[in-house]
Each structure stands twice: as C-alpha cells, then as structure tokens.
Amino acid sequence: MIYFDRVSKLYADNSAALEDVSFSVEPGEFVSIVGHSGAGKTTLVKMLLAEERPTSGAVFFESINVHEIPARKMGDLRRKIGTVFQDFRLLPNKTAYENIAFAMEAAGRPEEEIHSDVPHVLDLVDLGDKINNFPDELSGGEQQRVAIARAIVNQPDVIVADEPTGNLDPVNTFEVVQILKKINDLGTTVILTTHNKGVIDALKKRVITMDRGKVIRDDREGKYIL
Amino acid sequence: MNRVLIKRVLRAGALNFSRNVFVSVASILVMTVTLFVVGTTVFAGVILGSALEELRDKADVNVYFVQSATEDRILEMKASLEALPEVASVEYLSRDDALAQFRERHKNDQLTLSALEELGDNPLGAVLNVKAKDISQYEAIATFLQNQQSEGAGSIIDKVNFFDEQHRAALERLQSITDSASRLGFIIIVLLIVTTVAISFNTLRLAIYTSRDEIHVMRLVGAGPFYIRAPFMVEGVLYGVIAGVITLLLFYPLTYWLGTATSGFFGGVNVFSYYIAHFFIFFLLIVGTGIVLGVTASWLAVRRYLKL
C-alpha cells in the first residue's frame, strides 16, 4: 500500500534528514515510527504527504509515485490520507463542527451527509457537547480529538499521526492512542510517529526505529529500544 | 461550478470576514484611503482640466479689417476661416459692434469718449475673433491669413495681431504653462494612485500572511486551490464594496462643503453638482476599483502560500 524505495533527503549543507530509507506498509497495519528528535520521523511523514521532495528514491502510495502527482490532483491523495499533528493544526476561526465540515466540503461531500456525519464523528471522539466551540475554547486533548475526527471523517485509507501525543498529558495521551487503536481495529491503516516509550510498549504493534535519518530496526511486535 | 460550491465559498468568505474583525476593519480603512485618493484625483483632474480649458479659451487671434472693407467680403473670409480644420469658432464683430464694445470698455474714460465724439465718424474697422481648437494651431491659422493677404484679400485686412510679437509670445507662454500643468497634474495623479494602491495591496497581503498556516492546513486536509482561494477573494470583494460605499458617503458632505469654493475658482466647476450629476460613474469607478483591488490582492497573496 505504501512503499518507501531507497529514499534520501539531503539539505543544502549536505546534512542528511533521511538516508536510503526503504520499507513498506500493508493495508490495515498499525506501524509506529520511533526515534529521538531529529531522527527523521517528521521528514518521513512530509515525504508521504508530498510536502517535501526526496533528493533520491521514491515514495509510492497504492503504486503511484506521490511526487509525480500534479499539484491540482494533490487534494485527491491528501483526502486518502488523514493527518493528525502534534500542534493539532485546527483552523482557528472555525468551530469544532466547521473544522470537520471543512474537510468534508473540500472532498465535495453533500450538505446532508455533512449534517449527519459531523455530529456522529464528534460523538465518536467524545466531543458531542463541544460541537460549537472554537479551538481556543478547547483543551489540548480536546483539540487533538477534533483533529482526529477531522482526519477520519472522510474515511481515508491511512491515518498518519505525527507525534499526536507530544503536547498531551498522560490521560489524554492514553485516550488518543485508544482512539487510534479503535480506528485501526475498524480496518484503517495507521502510521504513528512518536518518541513516547510508554505508548509504544503498550501498543505491541510493528515498530520501525530510526536514528540519524536511517532505519535501524523494523520489528513485527516491537518495543521502544534506543 | 455548482451552486453548492458557490454557496460554500460565499459563506466561508462572509464568516472569515466577520470573525477576523480587526483584520477586516484595518483592511477596509486602508482601502478607504486608497479609494478616497482615487476619487479626489478625479475631482482634481476635473477642476484642473476646466481651469486649463478656461485659460486656453482666453487665447484668440484677431483679424482687423480696414474701414472700407465690405461686410460681404468679411463674411466670405469668415466662411473660409471656418472651413479650416484647426478653427474652433469665428466671431464676427461689425464696425458698429466694435464701436459699441469700445464705448463700453471706456465708459469711465470721458477724455477718450469725447475724442471719439470729435471724430464724428466711426474710426473702427470690423474684426474677426478666431479661436483655434488648440493653442498650437494658431500658427497654421496665421499662415492661412498671411496667404490670404498676399492673394488679394490684403486690401481689406488691416492687421492680424498674431504677427504682433507681444501677442505671439503671450500665446506661446500660455501654451507652455497649460501643457506643463496638465503634464504635472497627470504625473502627480499617477504617483498618488500608484502609492496608495501599493499600500492597500500590501495591507491585504499582510492580512492573508496571517492566514498562511491556515492555508497550509487546508492543503493538508485535501482542499483544492479554488476552494482555498475563493473565500479570500470573497473577503476582498467585501472589503472593496464596504470601503467604496464609505468613500462615496464621505464625498457627499465633503463636496457639498467645497462646492461653492470650487465654483468660485477659475475653472468654475461646482464639485458637489459634478458629484451628484456623475454619481453613477463615481459609484462604478470607486466600488469597481475597490473590488478589483480586493480580488487581485487576495488572489496574488493566496497564490504565494498555495505553493506547497
């Protein structure tokens, strides 16, 4: 489903963010990518979303090289990949409802579907009572749950969560990980980047370990080993 | 483009506008200043144009005829002058008219009037006052008159004042003054408009700069370029329309207040009457400029952040 083929990313000063990275992700998998800060986890996510181009190598999503997708078709790719970020990245001038509705509108979904699906997905992340709140009226955990609701509302093939628990306390961290697990149980592929040892050890799923831009371990049922 | 998409874009634009009150108010204020400058330059242009027109209107060439010249021959010359493409109008002043005008001009000068009485007969000849369409064309008219003189009409022409060095110098001076004034006026107007448009443009770009992260997020959740850009353009239209209406409202009391003053000025244009008579054109110009400015600035500013 997703295939990184010998991907390298070099910057102008010749420092390598990624070096000869290859791995694949099968449909329905839950893959955690771990590593210290600066290991290249976020660069890897940006490559998959075609936010950054590799210096060499290629990234395939459903056998399509994502960096060969023309700009006007990029929306199609990004609607198949739901994204969740450490800093939530909600639209500050839109309510929880409108943030999620925006992703559906961008996908061209009809009004009736938006009216029925948005409250439903907010209920799923336990925020049914915060439907009309703006992001600055929500706690960090609540904002992240809105972000997750936005990521799943278009039923993407993959959810990419880049350090989603980085700004959260242990209770909210646990809740977010539980939601991601539930999403995966329902059949959606999940790629999670984190440096939270507790999260990884509790998950007991596939772990790819990165260090200084290289994949140094890829374990089926891994633990956080660094 | 379907109806649902248009509705969503309009709603998103209106919501952004109302929720970013500070940015919206700042953008409207700056745009109002720009549109005010655009409107003011139009008024200034009208006043300057009318003043220069009046100045130009003061220029003419006078053909003085000998006393024995018959009216038929003078009217014949008037007709041939009127046939020239450079001539705007020719006014015929008969001997009697010339005398009446002379008396009127010297009504307080008893000495001159009594000298005139002494003469008994009307000493003045008839006159043709020739106005050219443009000051620069008097030379051509004078050449025509010179040719006429040498071809026989000379017997009835007493004097053409264009060949009077002082008159000629005054005409040339007037032309250079009006030309420089129009050129300077045009340069000032263009500079003012370019400066304020640039300021307005930059304000809108800054307003959208604050939204660059949002645009990034919109791209990441899969929104297409049109769906991201269009609400910003709707906001730009709203800024333009509101700033345009404010400007038009401001001009009403301002031109009313300045109306009498400007009609006393040598152009004689009452800006208030001009504003009311040309309101529709002003509306199109001011609101239209606002909309074009808002839409273009938004379009260009968002384009920069869409490259992702």
Image (cartoon, coloured by chain):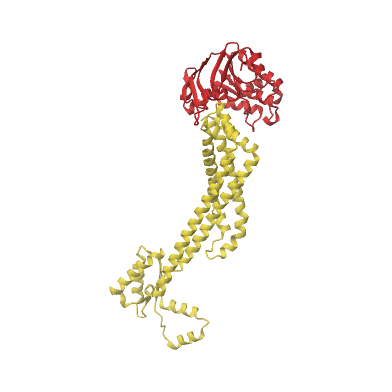
Chain colours: A red, B yellow
Judging depth in this view, the residue of B139 and B154 nearest the camera is B139
Residue B95 rendering spot, x and y as whole percentages = 41, 78
Residue A121, located in which quarter of the rendered image?
top right
Residue A9 rendering spot, x and y as whole percentages = 50, 25
Q: Is residue B198 left or right of residue A148?
A: left
Residue located at (47% from left, 66% from top) = B55
Q: Is residue A12 left or right of residue B145?
A: right
Q: Is residue B78 left or right of residue A177?
A: left
Residue A79 rendering spot, x and y as whole percentages = 55, 23
Up/down of B77 relative to A26, above or below: below
Residue located at (50% from left, 81% from top) = B106
Residue A209, located in which quarter of the rendered image?
top right
Up/down of B57 relative to B123, above or below: above
Kindly tell me whether residue B103 is visible in this rendering.
yes
Kindly tell me whether residue A28 is visible in this rendering.
no
Q: Residue reaching furthest bottom?
A: B118
How many marks the image carries: the answer is 0
Residue B217 rendering spot, x and y as whole percentages = 58, 29
Judging depth in this view, the residue of B18 and A195 nearest the camera is A195
Residue located at (35% from left, 80% from top) = B68
Judging depth in this view, the residue of A88 and B78 nearest the camera is A88
